[in-house]
Amino acid sequence: MAFKNPNTVLIVIYAKNTNRVLMLQRKDDPDFWQSVSGSLEPNEKPYKAAIREVTEETGFQIKAEHLCLFDCKKQIEFEIFPHFRYKYAPSVTHCREHWFLLALPEERIPTLAEHLAYQWLDPEQAAELTKSPNNSEAIKQYLIHKSAV
């Protein structure tokens, strides 16, 4: 079994017309809602990984649709939840995560391949819903407190 890379991306997707955030329900933990996220592939740069993950998890085509993927130029390190650590090498307990924002002109229906369900929520609701402290912080920093982007 190949272990997951502990270098990851987080992409907070929001609709410009409503400012609401897209949240996805995990298949492996239905109580866990989050933004698009995933591990970098070997030799993959975070920006390319973010484009790939958005397509894989939502079907949205960033380049073909001329969407603006914003690199927040922010990296954080976080502890992997114990019930997800089996996906990583035995000595890995933390991930390095690169943050991105993707603004869509309006809310739309994603094509779900890796998740059970989706919902569009106000940023405060999205930040409250996710179990991921870093996902919550990214939403708060860029969509509630509106840090410069």
Image (cartoon, rainbow, N blue to C red):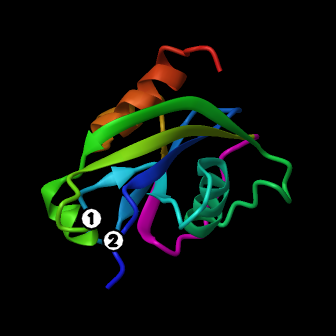
Q: Amino acid at mark 1?
A: Pro
Q: CA distance from mark 1 to mark 2?
A: 6 Å
Q: Estimate how packed mark 1 is, as few (under 14), some (14 to 19) or many (20 or more) residues with alpha carbons within 10 Å.
A: few
Which residue in the protein does label 2 denote? Answer: 27
The percent position of residue 127, horizontal first and vertical second, equals 36, 33
Tell me where residue 107 appears, x and y as whole percent: 65, 47
Residue situated in front as seen by the camera: 93 or 82: 93
Q: Which mark is residue 30?
A: 1
Kind of element beneath mark 1: loop
- The vertical placement of 113 against 39, above or below, is below
Amino acid tagged 2? Lys
- Please give the name of the residue rendered at 64% of the width and 63% of the height, measured from the top-left corner: 52
Q: Residue at x 36, y 33 (%)?
A: 136
Q: Quick check: is 33 in the magenta stretch?
A: no
Q: What are the residue bounds of the magenta stretch?
A: 105-119
Q: Residue at x 54, y 67 (%)?
A: 42
Q: Toward the viewer: 14 or 41?
A: 41
Q: Are there few (<14), some (14-19), or many (20+) residues within 10 Å of tag 2?
A: some
Q: Residue furthest left?
A: 82
Residue 64 figure quarter = bottom right
Q: Residue at x 61, y 37 (%)?
A: 101
Quarter of the image with the N terminus is bottom left
Q: Are marks 1 and 2 in contact (CB under 8 Å)?
A: yes
Question: Measured along the vertical axis of the image, is residue 108 above or below residue 52?
Answer: above
Q: Quadrant of residue 106?
A: top right
Q: Nearer the viewer, residue 125 or 100?
A: 100
What count of labels does the image hold? Answer: 2
7 or 10: nearer the eye?
7
Image disc number at residue 95:
none
Asked if residue 113 is among those painted magenta in the image, a careful observer would answer yes
Q: Position of residue 55 (x, y in %)?
A: 65, 64
Residue 128, compared with residue 55, is above or below; it is: above
